[in-house]
Image: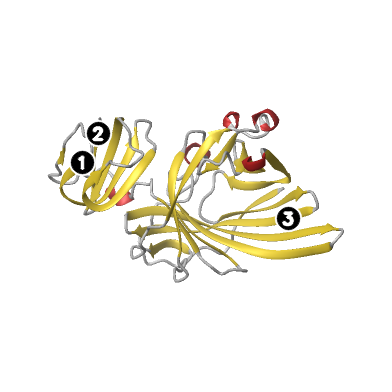
Amino acid sequence: MKTKLKLLGLSLMLTLPAMTQIQLTKGKNMPVAGDHFKVIEFSNNNVNEGNSGANVSWDFSSLNLQGIENNYAWKSVNQSLFTDTLNGRADIFLDINDVDGSMFFQTSNDSLQAIALGFPQDTSYVEYTDYLLYAVYPFTFGDSYTDDALLNIGAYSQSTKSTVTADAYGTLKLSTGTFSVLRLVTIDSITESAGGIGGSWSNKIVEISYDWYTQNSKIPLFSIAWDDNSLTKTVMYNNSEMPTSLKNQEVAAIQYYPNPVNDELNFSQTLEQITIYDSNGRLVKTYYNTNNISFSGTEITSGLYFVKVYHDQQQSQFKLIKL
């Protein structure tokens, strides 16, 4: 069950110029089969989520956005091991690092719900007794919803009370550029319990996540998350987003050679970021602060690619043929 409401008392006295508020919608922000992202994950207990409210500026430009690289792919349930049993209830699933789906989702005109967890190691899945509301559309600053979900696996039970609030909007500064964003804060209160011959136990945990979305984000551009048991903060960065400040501008006098290319692509100057996409527009690889790229030992095989280069708040793009 979900309850959607408008938070009251969020009007602020502002001296900053008003910014355009971002509204998350089904057409722009609901994931579909074929969406693919590379997400960088690392720990940093010194990072702070910053203020809430309107016209906020968050500056994380000093963070080194390097860490474990994870492949996020949204796929049709027909591509899953569980298509025969989940087809008709689930539409898509989120595949992380090609493990055939960690979570299965049902889509509708105004929401995205998680309905099952998949365990490809033993070719099984478990379905939520009460589905978990994952996203609501449209959603903008001041909006909030609460949801209760239940998952049972044998004698084990997990109940979740989730509250999601769009608590802020403004400008997010990262080392890769500046973005116009809407921030969502999610608080999950989770109760685990189990019983059996050896006795019973229960455990409570609160998970908190701050997620920054652009107008076109299918997953958060940037996230800070932790729980009250470990207090270790996890930072995640989706490096497929193009900074707002880089759009519709050209890097002056940039030259690149050779094209077509075999082993190495050279540039006439050192660039802050070089991003390569395949012919379907999916992110393949990102390089930072370099004037050449070596394709030896990478996943970049022969074919057509699109390259975007970023430098000094400007960007250019071109087609590249890899021999």
On the picture, is 208 further left or further right than 216? right
Amino acid under label 2? Answer: Leu
Image x and y of residue 171, in percent? 38, 58
Mark 2 vs mark 3, CA separation in Å: 50 Å
Q: Earlier in the sequence, mark 3 or mark 1?
A: 3
Q: How crowded is mark 3: few (under 14 residues within 10 Å), some or many (20 or more)?
A: many
Q: Which of labels 2 and 3 is toward the front? A: 2
Residue topped by disc 3: 159
Mark 1 vs mark 2, CA separation in Å: 10 Å
Amino acid under label 3? Answer: Ser
Frontmost residue, 258 versus 75 = 258
Disc 3 on helix, strand or loop? strand
Q: Which of marks 1 and 2 is nearer the N terminus?
A: 1
On the picture, is 79 further left or further right than 67? right
Mark 1 and mark 2 residues within 8 Å of each other at the beta carbon = yes
| Residue extending furthest toward the bottom | 46
Q: Is residue 114 visible?
A: yes
Q: Which of labels 3 and 1 is toward the front? A: 1
Residue topped by disc 2: 320
Residue topped by disc 1: 265
